[in-house]
Image (spheres, rainbow, N blue to C red):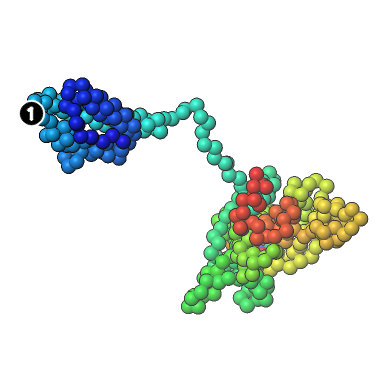
Amino acid sequence: MYSVSKLADFSPAALDSAARELKSALEDEAAAVSGEGEWKALRDRWMARKNGILTQLNDQWLKAAPAPAKRDVGQRVNELKKLVEEHIDSASARISTSGTASRLEQERVDVTLPGTRRKIGIEHPLVRTMNEIIAVFKAMGYSVAEGPEVETDYYNFESLNFPPNHPARDTQDTLIISGQQGKPLRERLLLRTHTSPVQIRTMEKQPPPVRVVVPGRVHRADTADATHSPIFHQVEGLAVDSNITFCDLKGTLDQAAKAMFGSSVRTRFYPSFFPFTEPSADMQISCFKCGGSGRLDGAKCGMCKASGWIEILGSGMVDPNVYGFVGYDAKKYSGFAFGMGVERIAILKYGIDDIQLFYQGDVRFLEQFA
Ligand code: DAH
C-alpha cells in the first residue's frame, strides 16, 4: 500500500517520478472502492487532517523542501491535492449510482415468468359425503333445512315423544349446558344429540306436504376412539303428506341406497325402536364388498363381518304423538322419517379404519379425496 516517503532529491525529475507514483496509487485505490464503508476509509486515508496522505505531503515534501525548490514543490502539492479530491469525489459518485442500478436490478419484474400457483382446496370427505346424500334426496324432490346445535330439551326430546325421565333418553348420552336448574326442563339447553329436532322445527313452520333433508353436526358424551367421536354428523329426512305409507319409506330409502352404494345393492328392514316413529326400522344394505354372500376370496368378508348385511340408518313412520306437538292432524296426514350417520357412510364408502382421521386435518389423508 502506498505511503509517502521522504524526498532526498527535490529536482523536477525526482518530483515528477514521486508524483507519478502517488497518482498511480491514488487511481488504483479509488478504482477498488465498491461500497460506502470502503469509500470512507479511502477518504480518511488520503484527506484526514491528522496524518492523512495530503497532510504528510505538506510535512514531508513541502516543509522539508530547501528554499529554492519550495515554489515548485508547493505548486505540485497543490495539484496533487486537487487530484486527490477529484478522485475521491468521483469514487463517491460511482458507488452511489451503482447502488441505484443494483436496486433497480433487484426490483426488476420479469412479466414472462409463470405466476405463483395456489392449490385449489377440496371438499372435506364428510362434507362431500353429506352433499352426495343430499343430492340423492334433492333429485327426489326434497329440500334442505338446518337447525341449531345448541337445542332445548323440548326440541331434542320432549316433542319427539321422549317423555321426561323416559329411559329412551339414556340411549343418547346427552351433553347438557350447566347452571340451568332454575328453568323448566323443556327450556333447558343441551347440545343436540341428533338432527331429529329439525323435523319439529320444520313442521312448526309449514303445513304438509313436507319433504326435507337435514344435514348437521350432533354431539354425544362419548370418548374419542377409532369408532367413536363426541362430535359427528347426521343427515335426517322427513316426508309428510296424505297417504304416505311404509311402502313409500321402503321405496325411497331403497332408491337412496342404490344411488349411494351402487344399483346392485339390496335393502332390508329390521324392526327397531325410536320414540318418534311407530313402527320403527333399521335399514340394512346387502354388503357391497362381498355382494351379500358374507365371503370374499374364500375367507370371511371383513366389511359385513361375514353377515352379508350392513346397517346404515334408522327410520320409521312418524308417531302420531309427534303430530300432536306441531298441530298436524294425525288422522289426515302420515309420513316417514329417517336418520343416518355421515361418518358411518363415509367410512363404509371409502374403507376408512379410524373415525378420528376425519377431524385431524392431516393433508396426507385429505388429499386422497382430491
Ligand atoms: N335420531 C336417531 C338417532 O340419532 C336416528 C333416527 C332414527 C332418525 C329414526 C329418524 C328416524 O328420523 O325416523 O339415533
Q: Residue furthest front?
A: 8
Q: Position of residue 280 (x, y in %)?
A: 74, 64
Residue drawn where x is 21% and y is 24% of the image: 14
Residue under the point 43% across and 30% down: 109
- Res. 158 image quadrant: bottom right
- Residue toward you, 43 or 53: 53
Q: Which residue is mark 1?
A: 67
Residue density around tag 1, few if under 14, some if 14–19, many if 20 or more, within 10 Å: few
Position of residue 330 relative to residue 137, above or below, is below
Residue 18 in sight here: yes
Seen as rendered, the residue at the extreme left is: 67
Residue located at (55% from left, 69% from top): 190
Q: Is residue 307 left or right of residue 255?
A: right
Q: Quadrant of the N terminus?
A: top left
Picture coordinates of residue 101, whole percent (x, y): 35, 29
Foreground pick, 31 / 95? 31
- Quadrant in the picture for the C terminus: top right
Q: Nearer the viewer, residue 29 or 164?
A: 29
- Residue 226, quarter of picture: bottom right
Residue pictured at 21% horizontal, 21% vertical: 13
Q: Position of residue 21 (x, y in %)?
A: 27, 27
Q: Name the quadrant containing residue 80.
A: top left
User: Ligand 1 appears in which quadrant?
Assistant: bottom right
Task: Report whether residue 130 is seen.
Answer: no
Q: Residue 144: x, y in percent?
A: 60, 50
Left or right: residue 37 versus residue 300 is left
Determine whether, in the image, residue 352 is placed left or right of residue 197: right
User: In this picture, is 30 found above or below 363?
Assistant: above
Q: Amino acid at mark 1?
A: Ala
Q: In front: 33, or 242?
A: 33
Give SS at disc 1: helix
